[in-house]
Amino acid sequence: MSITKLDDGRWFVDVEPIKGKRFRKRFKTKGEAQRYEATVRQKCIDNPVWSAKPKDRRRLSELVDRWAILHGHTLADGENRKRLLYMVAKDLGDPVASQLTAHHYAEYRTRLLAAGANGKTLNNRLGYLRAVFNELLQLGDIDFANPLQRVKPLKLQERELTWLNEGQIRTLFEAIRNRCKTPHVEMVARVCLSTGARWGEAESLVPARVRAGCVTFVNTKSKRTRSVPIDGELESALLQHFQDHGLFSNCRNSFDQTIKTCIALPAGQASHVLRHTFASHFMMNGGNILTLQKILGHGSLAMTMRYAHLSPDHLQDAVRLNPMRGLDTLWQ
């Protein structure tokens, strides 16, 4: 019976109209208890909020599918990220997503670190997987909290940015002229060094986007179109190049192979060193950090601040205001 009489004369209701949703309450009279039981049962029928929701038993790979359908397709690297997320789900054992825990993920990351995985790669994976839960939660496709919310990214030693000096730039272009079969490599590299563009942005230029002393980059990483001024000589050379050789072809691999034959670079760096070189020389020659942010198309100033230390007057107050200033006689 869902209604029983207690020793103290009161009536106790213990009703479970839907499995997982139980109601208990004491009343002075049997009539009150019966009305309460009837009300609870009726509300569970009329109002879904009162009904217990079935547990979400979807596996992590299924949530990746939902993320790809609802959001991933809007990203420029959506397909690549989807494949990576499938791989992560498989490595984790494709658990029921609602049962994934921070502890489970931390153990997985520890195994990969012990196997020699790169810290930045693991931080990227954590960020991508977090984004899946956050996006589906925001869209109402899941109703449980992000299980990775409290997993902290690994603290990594900031890598020193590599850039080319004038001698290395000359060496690079000599190697390009001697080794590269396509004429596009030299011109794309020239655009990157003159504008700070990423290789893919420069490679996608067409004649219509070279005019009025500017080049305009579209389909950028930040999804924002941006224009960067160039000198008349480069503008004329670009237009002549398009007329003589047509649009740029995909020649990044040719550049990457060439630069590795003449300049020693840290692992993982090749064409992007041209962008670093532009930014570094811009700051060393007295450029403004806010102007550089706009030229590079960075969404936040924090990214551009990596180059601030190259400014001639950066942190020079450390020399002017340090406590040893004026105490040179101690070493005489």
Image (cartoon, rainbow, N blue to C red):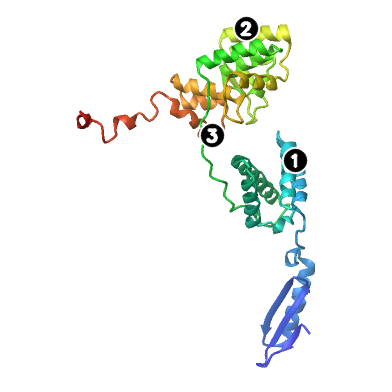
Q: Quadrant of residue 286?
A: top left
Residue position for label 1: 83
Between the C-alphas of marks 1 and 2, the distance is 43 Å
Give the mark nearest the N terminus, 2 or 3.
2
Between the C-alphas of marks 3 and 1, the distance is 28 Å
Q: Amino acid at mark 3?
A: Ser
Give the mark nearest the N terminus, 3 or 1.
1
Q: Secondary structure at mark 2?
A: helix
Callout 1 environment at 10 Å: few (<14), some (14 to 19), or many (20+)?
few
Looking at the image, which is closer to me, 288 or 280? 280
Q: Nearer the viewer, mark 3 or mark 1?
A: 1
Between the C-alphas of marks 2 and 3, the distance is 33 Å
- Does the residue at mark 3 contact the one at mark 1 (Cβ under 8 Å)? no
Q: Which mark is residue 236?
A: 2
Looking at the image, which is closer to me, 196 or 134? 196
Q: Against 150, is 41 above or below?
A: below
Name the residue: 60% across, 11% down. 174
Name the residue: 63% across, 44% down. 127
* Image location of residue 189, percent across then percent down: 62, 17
* Image location of residue 183, percent across then percent down: 69, 11
Residue position for label 3: 300
* Image location of residue 275, percent across then percent down: 57, 23
Q: Secondary structure at mark 1?
A: helix
Q: Secondary structure at mark 3?
A: loop
